[in-house]
Image: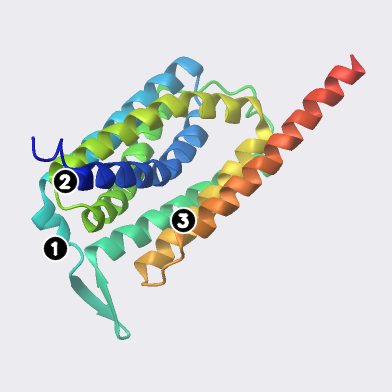
């Protein structure tokens, strides 16, 4: 009840929710790229499972705050550089994102013969879920450690995470459909994933790249691509 009537608590909730939504952009982009390679029915199910897992992982991490804070303590030293479990997880997750995005870009550029006629196997859905679990863990860890630094009350953190996940769920469908319908936007999304992966690896090694720069680059590139999509659509209408 004290939190409900506290202006400071509401301010913290709004700020943290906004931050969690921004951090969730990474999740939505990754999900949109992954589900573009499986049938629509499976894609919807994969998105639902992925976002549900994102919510579960975030709440579970919030419930073990003492253990989570311990992940920021140095565990190994390499050439004078101390690395914690958080750093190792961020580096591993960043490398996974870079490798995954690079592999997908290679596939799009090569446009290998036979891909168009291939039917996604049942194992494809399984591997999509496995990849979603891996990256959800990385993004959840980064997101919750950020939340711990901004709010003191776990109720506020959980409320912000739940609100952000609901917004991610609502927006993921339109984003995934748009990426599937416009191949050039998929290439742009893959480039974003490389950029995000590089930022995670840099964070892991103690070199912080302000996320504002990254999200501005993403927003600017997405706006340019939107104009390209509109221009192509208008040219097709003019031809008809």
Q: Quadrant of the C terminus?
A: top right
Question: Under tag 1, what secondary structure?
Answer: helix
In the image, taking residue 136 as reference, residue 85 lies left or right, namely left
Where is residue 2 drawn, in percent x and y?
A: 9, 40
The picture quadrant where one finds residue 208 is: bottom left
- Residue to which mark 1 is pinned: 70
Upstream in sequence: badge 1 or badge 2 = 2
- Residue to which mark 3 is pinned: 197
Upstream in sequence: badge 2 or badge 3 = 2
Where is residue 36 drawn, in percent x and y?
A: 53, 29
In the picture as drawn, the residue positioned furthest to the bottom comes out as 80
Name the residue: 48% across, 61% down.
198
Name the residue: 61% across, 37% down.
186
Where is residue 212 drawn, in percent x and y?
A: 49, 57
What colour scheme has been applied to the protein in the rendered image?
A: rainbow
Question: Under tag 3, what secondary structure?
Answer: helix
């Amino acid at each position: 009840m004290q939190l409900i009537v506290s202006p400071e608590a509401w301010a913290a909730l709004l700020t943290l929710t906004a931050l969690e939504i921004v951090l969730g952009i990474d999740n939505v982009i990754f999900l949109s790229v992954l589900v573009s390679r499986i049938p629509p029915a499976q894609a919807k199910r994969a998105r639902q499972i992925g976002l549900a897992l994102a919510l579960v992982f975030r709440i579970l991490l919030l419930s073990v705050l003492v253990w989570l804070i311990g992940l920021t303590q140095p565990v190994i030293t390499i050439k004078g550089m101390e690395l914690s479990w958080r750093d190792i997880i961020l580096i591993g997750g960043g490398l996974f994102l870079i490798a995954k995005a690079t592999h997908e870009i290679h596939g799009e550029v090569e446009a290998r013969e036979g891909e168009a006629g291939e039917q996604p196997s049942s194992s494809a859905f399984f591997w999509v879920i496995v990849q979603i679990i891996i990256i959800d863990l990385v993004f959840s860890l980064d997101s919750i450690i950020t939340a711990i630094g901004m709010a003191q009350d776990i109720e506020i953190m959980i409320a912000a995470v739940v609100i952000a996940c609901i917004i991610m769920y609502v927006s993921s469908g339109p984003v995934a459909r748009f990426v599937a319908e416009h191949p050039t936007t998929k290439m742009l999304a893959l480039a974003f994933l490389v950029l995000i992966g590089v930022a995670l690896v840099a964070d892991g090694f103690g070199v912080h790249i302000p996320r504002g720069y990254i999200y501005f680059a993403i927003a600017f590139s997405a706006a340019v691509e939107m104009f390209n999509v509109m221009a192509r659509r208008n040219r097709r209408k003019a031809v008809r």
